Amino acid sequence: MKPEALLQKLEAAASSLDVKVSYESIAANVGPGGLCRVKGKYRVIIEKRTTPAERVGVLAAALARVIPNCEGAELEPAVLDACDYYAMPRAS
C-alpha cells in the first residue's frame, strides 16, 4: 500500500479513536513529532515538512500506544498491521 493511502487510513483511525492529528512546524532538534496529551485528550503532532512515509511512521507509532486503551474499536487490518510494525523496538 502506498504511504499516502495508508496515511489516510491512519488519520481516519485516529479520528475514530478521538485522537487529534495536526501538522505543524517543529524545531529540528525535537524530531518528527509524536503523541502527547492536551487537557486529557490524546494528540499527535507531526512535523509538517515530513514525507508521507515518515508521517505514517510517526502516526502509527503514536496510535500503537493509544489502541490498547480503546477496547472495542474496529480498525482496518492495514491500520493494525502498521501500528504493530511501528510499535516494535528497532535494533540499532
Image (cartoon, rainbow, N blue to C red):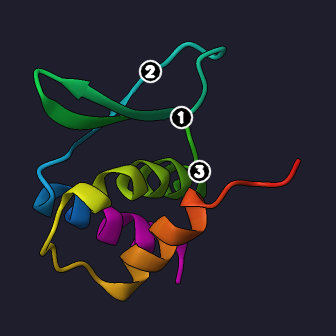
Q: Is residue 19 magenta?
A: no
Amino acid type, mark 3: Glu
Between 4 and 44, the one lying in front of the other is: 44
Q: Which residue is mark 1?
A: 49
Q: CA distance from mark 3 to mark 2?
A: 15 Å
- The vertical placement of 57 against 13, above or below, is above
Left or right side of 90 for 53: left
Residue type indicated by callout 1? Arg
- Identify residue for label 2: 25
23 over 54 or under it: above or below: above
The spot of residue 62 in percent (x, y) is 41, 47
**Any part of residue 19 in sight:** yes
Nearer-N-terminus badge (3/2): 2
Q: Is residue 44 above or below residue 7?
A: above
Q: Residues within 10 Å of mark 2 (few under 14, many from 20)?
A: some
Q: Are marks 2 and 1 in contact (CB under 8 Å)?
A: yes
Mark 2–mark 1 distance (CA, rounded to whole Å): 7 Å
Element type at mark 2: loop
Residue 24 in the image, given as x and y percentages of width and height: 37, 26
Label 3 to label 1: alpha-carbon separation: 10 Å
Residue 47 at least partly seen:
no
Residue where numbered disc 3 is placed: 54
Quarter of the rendering containing residue 40: top left
Q: Main secondary structure of the magenta part?
A: helix
Q: Which range of residues does the magenta coloring cover?
A: 1-11
The verdict on residue 9 being magenta is yes
Mark before the other along the chain sequence, 2 or 1:
2
- Amino acid at pointer 2: Ser
Closer to the camera, 43 or 3?
Answer: 43
